[in-house]
Amino acid sequence: MVSYPDRAMEYRQIITKAVCGKGRRFLQSTHTVKPPENIHTILGAWVINHQYECTKVGEAVEVSGKYDVNIWYSTKGNTKTDVIKETVYYTEQVPLSYYDRNTRDSTVTVSATVTQAPNCVEASIASHTDGIADGIVVRVEKEFAVEMVGQTKICVPVYPLEYAETDEKDLAGSYEEHVDEDSFDELDPDLIIDDLED
C-alpha cells in the first residue's frame, strides 16, 4: 500500500460562508441644540436611546441611526433647572479595511457592533445675543466595528478515506517527514483566488 505522504497532494475547492470583510471607525460629531429659554449654566449632558441599522455600500458599511441628547441646565439666575431633549439622526460610513472581492454579493450580510456607545464629551453655550443663548454645542463620540459575512470559495487538502480514523497529530507528523520546504514553491498562488461563477 502506498503511504499517503508518497502520494500526490490533492486539493478541492469548496464554497462556504466566511467572514469576508472587517472594519472599524471612531467618529466625532458636533450638534447644536436650540434652548427654549435663556440658559445660565449647563449642569450636565448625556446621550440615551441609541438605535441603529447597517447596510453594505460599495466597499464600506453604512450605519444609520439616532439617539437622544439630554441637556440639564439652570435658568433664572440659577434658581430653576430643567432638561431639554433633542433627537439626533446620523449616517456614517465605515470602510472595510479587509475585503474579499471574491465574495458573492447576493449572499452578503453585514453587521455592526458599537464598541463605544455615543457619549457626550463636551457641552457649551455657543454665544449670546441680547443676553439669550443662541445654542448649546454638544460634542459626541462613538465607535463602530463592522463585519461582512458571505459565500466565498476556499481550497482545502483532501485526505483519502482510510485516513479518516487517523489521529490528526500522527497524520501531520507523518506528512511533514516526507515534505521539504522547496515543494511548496510549486504551489499555484492563484488556486485559492478563483472565479466563483465556475
Image: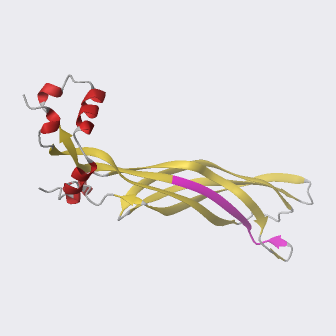
Residue 65 percent across, percent down from the top left: 51, 55
Residue 107 percent across, percent down from the top left: 26, 50
Q: Is residue 138 magenta?
A: yes
Q: Residue at x 69, y 56 (%)?
A: 120
Q: Nearer the viewer, residue 108 or 78?
A: 108
Type of colouring: secondary structure
> How many numbered marks appear?
0
Q: Residue at x 82, y 71 (%)?
A: 132
Which quadrant would the N terminus be assigned to in this image?
Answer: top left
* Relative to 82, 190 lies left or right: left
Q: Is residue 115 magenta?
A: no
Q: Residue at x 27, y 34 (%)?
A: 172
Question: Residue most toward the bottom?
Answer: 129
Q: Residue at x 27, y 27 (%)?
A: 170
* Relative to 56, 159 lies left or right: left
Does the magenta stretch mainly form a helix, a strand or a loop? strand
Q: Residue 188's image quarter?
A: bottom left
For the magenta stretch, what is the residue range? 132-144
Residue 139 percent across, percent down from the top left: 68, 62
